[in-house]
Image (tube, rainbow, N blue to C red):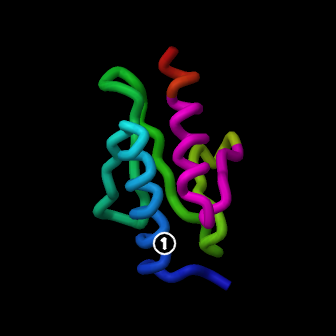
Amino acid sequence: MSADHSEKMRLLVALCRELARLGLPSVMSDARPALSVGGGPADPKLWISVSPCGEFFEWCPDSGGRFPADNPECAAETIAGRLRAHTG
């Protein structure tokens, strides 16, 4: 079963709110249901999307970055930790 566009957007908005609460601004994509967040101007942006089934937030698909979409608060904390680890 796949999640529809509006469900993916709802999940991403919830994640966006949690990232903002942690002081990490994010930007929603106009092209597809996704958002980007970065640690700083010199750091590459991390693109986050929702899996086709709607069960996971996914980032860096080649490294397997994913977190259950039913817990945006913990997903935001995981993403924040990853960004902080890469920015020093």
Q: In which quarter of the image is the N terminus?
A: bottom right
Q: Residue 23, located in which quarter of the rendered image?
A: top left
Residue at image point 57% right, 32% down: 81
Amino acid type for the residue under numbered disc 1: Lys
Outermost residue to the top: 88
Q: Main secondary structure of the magenta part?
A: helix
* Residue sitting at x 50%, y 52%: 48
Depth check: give the residue in front, 12 or 51.
Answer: 12
Q: In this view, does 13 lie to the left or right of 76?
A: left
Question: Element under label 1?
Answer: helix
In the rendered image, the vertical position of residue 62 relative to residue 70, given as above or below: above
Q: How crowded is mark 1: few (under 14 residues within 10 Å), some or many (20 or more)?
A: many
The residue drawn where x is 61% and y is 60% is 71
Whole-percent x, y for residue 42 in the image: 35, 21
**Magenta residue check for 74:** yes
User: Over which residues does the magenta segment extend?
Assistant: 64-83
Q: Where is residue 9 in the image (x, y as percent from the top left)?
A: 42, 71
Residue for badge 1: 8
Task: Classify residue 58 as left or right of residue 45.
Answer: right
Residue 10 location, quadrant: bottom left
Identify the residue shown where x is 66% and y is 53%: 67
- Residue 21 is situated, as x and y percent measured from the top left of the image, at 39, 45
Q: Is residue 16 magenta-colored? A: no
Q: Is residue 77 above or below residue 1?
A: above
Whether residue 1 is situated above or below residue 82 in the rendered picture: below
List x then y, in percent, for residue 24. 38, 38
